[in-house]
Protein backbone atom coordinates (compact mmCIF):
# COMPACT_ATOMS: atom_id res chain seq x y z
CA UNK A 1 0.00 0.00 0.00
CA UNK A 2 2.81 2.48 0.87
CA UNK A 3 4.41 2.15 -2.56
CA UNK A 4 1.03 2.53 -4.24
CA UNK A 5 0.29 5.70 -2.26
CA UNK A 6 3.65 7.18 -3.26
CA UNK A 7 3.07 6.42 -6.94
CA UNK A 8 -0.49 7.74 -6.82
CA UNK A 9 0.56 10.97 -5.08
CA UNK A 10 3.26 11.63 -7.68
CA UNK A 11 0.88 10.82 -10.52
CA UNK A 12 -1.75 13.22 -9.20
CA UNK A 13 0.82 15.97 -8.67
CA UNK A 14 2.25 15.55 -12.18
CA UNK A 15 -1.21 15.84 -13.71
CA UNK A 16 -2.41 18.75 -11.58
CA UNK A 17 -1.91 22.47 -11.95
CA UNK A 18 0.81 22.23 -9.23
CA UNK A 19 -1.22 24.41 -6.88
CA UNK A 20 -2.38 21.38 -4.93
CA UNK A 21 -1.24 19.99 -1.62
CA UNK A 22 -1.48 16.18 -1.69
CA UNK A 23 -0.98 13.83 1.26
CA UNK A 24 -1.96 10.34 2.37
CA UNK A 25 -4.37 9.97 5.31
CA UNK A 26 -5.97 7.27 7.44
CA UNK A 27 -9.55 8.05 8.39
CA UNK A 28 -11.55 6.32 11.12
CA UNK A 29 -15.20 5.93 10.17
CA UNK A 30 -18.21 4.46 11.93
CA UNK A 31 -17.57 1.32 14.00
CA UNK A 32 -13.85 2.13 13.93
CA UNK A 33 -13.54 1.01 10.30
CA UNK A 34 -10.34 2.50 8.88
CA UNK A 35 -9.90 3.80 5.35
CA UNK A 36 -6.73 4.83 3.57
CA UNK A 37 -7.02 7.91 1.44
CA UNK A 38 -5.45 10.78 -0.44
CA UNK A 39 -6.22 14.30 0.77
CA UNK A 40 -6.13 17.05 -1.85
CA UNK A 41 -6.38 20.75 -1.12
CA UNK A 42 -5.51 24.04 -2.77
CA UNK A 43 -2.33 25.55 -1.34
CA UNK A 44 -4.22 28.79 -0.66
CA UNK A 45 -7.22 27.12 1.02
CA UNK A 46 -7.87 25.75 4.51
CA UNK A 47 -9.88 22.74 3.43
CA UNK A 48 -9.23 19.58 1.50
CA UNK A 49 -11.13 16.60 0.19
CA UNK A 50 -10.42 12.96 0.96
CA UNK A 51 -10.46 10.27 -1.71
CA UNK A 52 -10.46 6.75 -0.33
CA UNK A 53 -8.22 4.43 -2.30
CA UNK A 54 -8.60 0.96 -0.75
CA UNK A 55 -10.55 -0.30 -3.78
CA UNK A 56 -8.07 1.39 -6.13
CA UNK A 57 -5.26 -0.52 -4.41
CA UNK A 58 -6.93 -3.76 -5.45
CA UNK A 59 -7.16 -2.47 -9.02
CA UNK A 60 -3.46 -1.57 -8.82
CA UNK A 61 -2.60 -5.10 -7.71
CA UNK A 62 -4.62 -6.39 -10.66
CA UNK A 63 -2.39 -4.43 -13.03
CA UNK A 64 -4.37 -1.25 -13.65
CA UNK A 65 -2.35 1.88 -14.40
CA UNK A 66 -1.83 4.34 -11.55
CA UNK A 67 -2.10 7.23 -14.00
CA UNK A 68 -5.68 6.30 -14.91
CA UNK A 69 -6.65 6.33 -11.24
CA UNK A 70 -4.92 9.68 -10.73
CA UNK A 71 -7.01 11.10 -13.59
CA UNK A 72 -10.19 9.78 -11.94
CA UNK A 73 -9.35 11.44 -8.63
CA UNK A 74 -8.41 14.76 -10.20
CA UNK A 75 -11.52 14.79 -12.36
CA UNK A 76 -13.73 14.26 -9.30
CA UNK A 77 -11.78 16.84 -7.29
CA UNK A 78 -12.13 19.58 -9.89
CA UNK A 79 -15.78 18.68 -10.55
CA UNK A 80 -16.61 19.19 -6.87
CA UNK A 81 -14.48 22.31 -6.46
CA UNK A 82 -15.80 25.85 -6.61
CA UNK A 83 -19.02 27.13 -5.05
CA UNK A 84 -19.43 24.07 -2.82
CA UNK A 85 -15.93 24.57 -1.48
CA UNK A 86 -16.66 28.23 -0.85
CA UNK A 87 -19.78 27.29 1.12
CA UNK A 88 -17.82 24.78 3.20
CA UNK A 89 -15.05 27.30 3.75
CA UNK A 90 -17.50 29.90 5.05
CA UNK A 91 -18.90 27.40 7.54
CA UNK A 92 -15.43 26.38 8.70
CA UNK A 93 -14.60 30.04 9.29
CA UNK A 94 -17.65 30.27 11.55
CA UNK A 95 -17.01 27.12 13.59
CA UNK A 96 -15.59 28.98 16.59
CA UNK A 97 -18.83 30.96 16.99
CA UNK A 98 -21.85 28.82 17.86
CA UNK A 99 -24.33 31.46 16.72
CA UNK A 100 -22.73 31.40 13.25
CA UNK A 101 -22.88 27.64 12.91
CA UNK A 102 -25.87 26.62 15.05
CA UNK A 103 -28.33 26.13 12.18
CA UNK A 104 -26.03 23.48 10.66
CA UNK A 105 -25.48 21.28 13.74
CA UNK A 106 -27.16 17.87 13.38
CA UNK A 107 -27.26 14.51 15.17
CA UNK A 108 -26.14 11.00 14.32
CA UNK A 109 -26.49 7.72 16.21
CA UNK A 110 -23.57 5.31 16.53
CA UNK A 111 -22.75 2.36 18.73
CA UNK A 112 -20.70 3.44 21.73
CA UNK A 113 -18.73 0.22 22.24
CA UNK A 114 -17.93 -0.29 18.56
CA UNK A 115 -16.73 3.32 18.16
CA UNK A 116 -14.15 3.67 20.91
CA UNK A 117 -11.50 5.10 18.58
CA UNK A 118 -13.88 7.19 16.51
CA UNK A 119 -15.44 8.85 19.58
CA UNK A 120 -12.17 9.52 21.40
CA UNK A 121 -12.08 13.27 20.66
CA UNK A 122 -15.75 13.73 19.69
CA UNK A 123 -18.46 15.32 21.80
CA UNK A 124 -21.38 12.95 22.32
CA UNK A 125 -24.25 12.14 24.67
CA UNK A 126 -24.65 8.51 25.87
CA UNK A 127 -28.00 6.97 24.91
CA UNK A 128 -28.59 3.36 25.96
CA UNK A 129 -25.73 1.42 24.32
CA UNK A 130 -25.46 4.11 21.67
CA UNK A 131 -23.93 7.56 21.40
CA UNK A 132 -25.71 10.63 20.09
CA UNK A 133 -22.88 12.32 18.21
CA UNK A 134 -22.98 15.85 16.82
CA UNK A 135 -21.90 16.96 13.37
CA UNK A 136 -21.82 20.17 11.38
CA UNK A 137 -23.54 19.85 8.01
CA UNK A 138 -21.16 21.40 5.49
CA UNK A 139 -23.04 20.53 2.33
CA UNK A 140 -25.42 18.02 0.80
CA UNK A 141 -26.39 16.61 -2.55
CA UNK A 142 -28.51 13.73 -3.84
CA UNK A 143 -25.47 11.49 -3.38
CA UNK A 144 -24.86 12.28 0.28
CA UNK A 145 -23.68 14.86 2.75
CA UNK A 146 -20.42 16.51 3.76
CA UNK A 147 -20.04 16.81 7.53
CA UNK A 148 -17.44 17.48 10.17
CA UNK A 149 -17.70 16.10 13.69
CA UNK A 150 -18.17 18.33 16.72
CA UNK A 151 -15.10 17.78 18.89
CA UNK A 152 -14.80 18.12 22.66
CA UNK A 153 -12.63 21.18 22.10
CA UNK A 154 -15.20 22.75 19.81
CA UNK A 155 -18.02 22.22 22.31
CA UNK A 156 -15.93 23.73 25.10
CA UNK A 157 -15.14 26.77 22.95
CA UNK A 158 -18.84 27.35 22.23
CA UNK A 159 -19.55 27.73 25.97
CA UNK A 160 -23.09 26.38 25.79
CA UNK A 161 -24.96 23.70 27.73
CA UNK A 162 -25.43 20.14 26.55
CA UNK A 163 -29.18 20.71 26.58
CA UNK A 164 -28.92 23.74 24.28
CA UNK A 165 -26.70 21.83 21.87
CA UNK A 166 -29.03 18.82 21.78
CA UNK A 167 -32.22 20.84 21.40
CA UNK A 168 -30.67 22.88 18.59
CA UNK A 169 -29.34 19.78 16.82
CA UNK A 170 -32.55 17.73 17.04
CA UNK A 171 -34.58 20.59 15.51
CA UNK A 172 -32.05 20.96 12.69
CA UNK A 173 -31.92 17.21 12.08
CA UNK A 174 -35.70 16.89 11.83
CA UNK A 175 -35.76 19.83 9.41
CA UNK A 176 -32.88 18.69 7.21
CA UNK A 177 -33.66 14.96 7.35
CA UNK A 178 -37.41 14.50 7.89
CA UNK A 179 -38.36 11.08 9.16
CA UNK A 180 -40.59 8.73 7.21
CA UNK A 181 -42.31 5.47 8.19
CA UNK A 182 -43.33 2.98 5.53
CA UNK A 183 -44.36 -0.65 5.57
CA UNK A 184 -41.81 -3.21 4.48
CA UNK A 185 -44.06 -4.18 1.62
CA UNK A 186 -44.18 -0.63 0.23
CA UNK A 187 -40.42 -0.18 0.44
CA UNK A 188 -39.83 -3.49 -1.28
CA UNK A 189 -42.27 -2.48 -4.01
CA UNK A 190 -40.39 0.78 -4.46
CA UNK A 191 -37.09 -1.18 -4.44
CA UNK A 192 -35.74 1.12 -1.73
CA UNK A 193 -34.77 -1.90 0.39
CA UNK A 194 -32.69 -4.69 -1.13
CA UNK A 195 -34.69 -7.94 -0.91
CA UNK A 196 -31.45 -9.88 -0.47
CA UNK A 197 -30.52 -7.84 2.60
CA UNK A 198 -33.69 -8.78 4.45
CA UNK A 199 -34.04 -12.31 3.07
CA UNK A 200 -33.32 -13.85 6.49
CA UNK A 201 -36.11 -11.86 8.18
CA UNK A 202 -39.45 -13.64 8.27
CA UNK A 203 -42.04 -11.37 9.93
CA UNK A 204 -44.67 -14.08 10.22
CA UNK A 205 -42.30 -16.53 11.88
CA UNK A 206 -40.49 -14.19 14.25
CA UNK A 207 -42.96 -11.42 14.99
CA UNK A 208 -46.37 -12.61 13.92
CA UNK A 209 -47.17 -9.10 12.68
CA UNK A 210 -46.30 -6.57 10.02
CA UNK A 211 -43.11 -4.54 10.11
CA UNK A 212 -42.50 -0.90 9.33
CA UNK A 213 -39.29 0.94 8.47
CA UNK A 214 -38.35 4.22 10.12
CA UNK A 215 -35.72 6.20 8.22
CA UNK A 216 -35.35 9.65 6.65
CA UNK A 217 -36.11 11.01 3.21
CA UNK A 218 -32.53 10.41 2.03
CA UNK A 219 -32.49 6.80 3.31
CA UNK A 220 -29.06 7.59 4.74
CA UNK A 221 -28.22 7.55 8.48
CA UNK A 222 -31.96 7.30 8.99
CA UNK A 223 -31.71 5.36 12.27
CA UNK A 224 -31.27 8.76 13.92
CA UNK A 225 -35.00 9.24 13.32
CA UNK A 226 -35.67 6.97 16.33
CA UNK A 227 -34.89 10.14 18.33
CA UNK A 228 -37.93 11.84 16.72
CA UNK A 229 -40.28 10.96 19.56
CA UNK A 230 -43.33 12.79 18.22
CA UNK A 231 -43.16 10.65 15.10
CA UNK A 232 -42.92 7.47 17.18
CA UNK A 233 -45.90 8.58 19.27
CA UNK A 234 -47.99 9.29 16.16
CA UNK A 235 -47.05 5.87 14.78
CA UNK A 236 -48.29 4.14 17.96
CA UNK A 237 -51.50 6.14 17.89
CA UNK A 238 -52.10 5.14 14.28
CA UNK A 239 -51.61 1.46 15.16
CA UNK A 240 -53.65 1.66 18.39
CA UNK A 241 -50.75 0.30 20.43
CA UNK A 242 -48.98 1.45 23.57
CA UNK A 243 -45.49 1.22 22.15
CA UNK A 244 -43.23 -0.33 19.55
CA UNK A 245 -40.30 -2.67 19.38
CA UNK A 246 -37.37 -1.01 17.60
CA UNK A 247 -35.07 -3.33 15.64
CA UNK A 248 -31.73 -1.70 14.69
CA UNK A 249 -31.47 -2.84 11.08
CA UNK A 250 -28.51 -0.53 10.35
CA UNK A 251 -27.41 3.08 10.79
CA UNK A 252 -29.63 3.83 7.81
CA UNK A 253 -32.94 2.57 9.18
CA UNK A 254 -34.68 0.83 12.07
CA UNK A 255 -37.63 -1.54 11.98
CA UNK A 256 -40.75 -0.76 14.01
CA UNK A 257 -43.07 -3.49 15.25
CA UNK A 258 -46.34 -2.41 16.90
CA UNK A 259 -46.13 -3.77 20.43
CA UNK A 260 -49.72 -4.90 20.75
CA UNK A 261 -50.50 -6.87 23.87
CA UNK A 262 -51.64 -9.99 22.06
CA UNK A 263 -48.32 -10.29 20.23
CA UNK A 264 -45.56 -12.24 21.95
CA UNK A 265 -42.09 -11.41 20.71
CA UNK A 266 -39.35 -13.93 21.44
CA UNK A 267 -36.32 -11.91 22.69
CA UNK A 268 -33.87 -14.71 21.79
CA UNK A 269 -35.21 -14.90 18.23
CA UNK A 270 -34.97 -11.12 17.83
CA UNK A 271 -31.36 -10.94 19.03
CA UNK A 272 -30.32 -13.93 16.89
CA UNK A 273 -31.96 -12.38 13.85
CA UNK A 274 -30.18 -9.03 14.35
CA UNK A 275 -26.80 -10.71 14.88
CA UNK A 276 -27.21 -12.89 11.77
CA UNK A 277 -28.30 -10.01 9.54
CA UNK A 278 -25.42 -7.83 10.78
CA UNK A 279 -22.82 -10.49 10.06
CA UNK A 280 -24.20 -11.75 6.75
CA UNK A 281 -26.06 -8.90 5.06
CA UNK A 282 -24.82 -5.57 6.48
CA UNK A 283 -21.43 -3.91 6.01
CA UNK A 284 -19.64 -3.48 9.34
CA UNK A 285 -19.56 0.29 8.92
CA UNK A 286 -23.38 0.28 8.85
CA UNK A 287 -23.97 -1.75 12.03
CA UNK A 288 -25.89 0.11 14.71
CA UNK A 289 -26.49 -2.42 17.49
CA UNK A 290 -27.03 -6.12 18.10
CA UNK A 291 -30.19 -5.98 20.20
CA UNK A 292 -33.64 -4.35 20.14
CA UNK A 293 -35.24 -1.49 22.04
CA UNK A 294 -38.74 -0.61 23.22
CA UNK A 295 -40.51 2.70 22.74
CA UNK A 296 -43.15 3.28 25.43
CA UNK A 297 -45.71 5.79 24.20
CA UNK A 298 -47.09 6.46 27.69
CA UNK A 299 -43.74 7.53 29.16
CA UNK A 300 -42.51 8.75 25.74
CA UNK A 301 -39.19 7.00 26.40
CA UNK A 302 -37.00 4.46 24.64
CA UNK A 303 -35.43 1.71 26.74
CA UNK A 304 -33.48 -1.49 26.23
CA UNK A 305 -35.79 -4.37 25.26
CA UNK A 306 -34.31 -6.54 28.02
CA UNK A 307 -34.77 -4.07 30.90
Image (spheres, grey):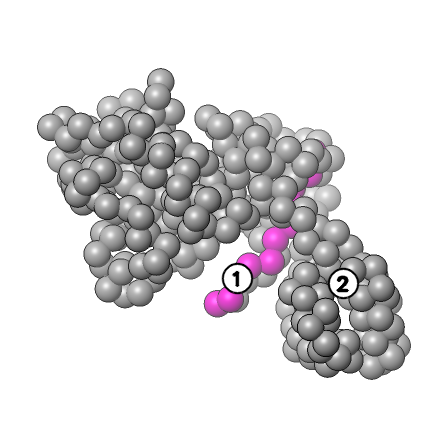
Q: Position of residue 101 (x, y in %)?
A: 63, 48
- When asked about the image quadrant of residue 113, the answer is top right
| 133 within the magenta span | no
- Which residue occupies the foreground of this view, 200 or 9? 200
Of mark 1 and mark 2, the one earlier in the sequence is 2
Q: In the rendered view, does 204 fall on the left or right side of 91? A: left
Tell me if residue 47 comes above or below residue 130 in the rendering: below
- Which region is colored magenta? 142-152
Quarter in which the N terminus is drawn? bottom right
Give the CA separation, mark 1 to mark 2: 19 Å
Whether 255 is drawn above or below 35: the answer is above
Q: Residue at x 87, y 79 (%)?
A: 14
Residue 32 at x, y percent in the picture: 63, 42
| Residue at x 73%, y 71% (from the top left corner) | 60
Is residue 168 at all visible to an observer of this figure? no
Residue at the image position 83 percent from the left and 76 percent from the top: 11
- Tag shown at residue 144: 1
Location of mark 2 (residue) = 38
Q: Position of residue 255 (x, y in %)?
A: 31, 43
Amino acid sequence: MDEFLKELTVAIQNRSDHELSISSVEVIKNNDVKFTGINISRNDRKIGKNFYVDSMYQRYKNGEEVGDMAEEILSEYYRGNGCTEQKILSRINGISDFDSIKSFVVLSLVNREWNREYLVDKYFVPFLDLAVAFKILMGRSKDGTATTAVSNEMFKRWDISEQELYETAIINTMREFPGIIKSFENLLAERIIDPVKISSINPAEIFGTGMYVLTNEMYMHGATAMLYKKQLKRFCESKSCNGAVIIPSSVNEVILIPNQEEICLDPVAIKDMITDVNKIEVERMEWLSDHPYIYDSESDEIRDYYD
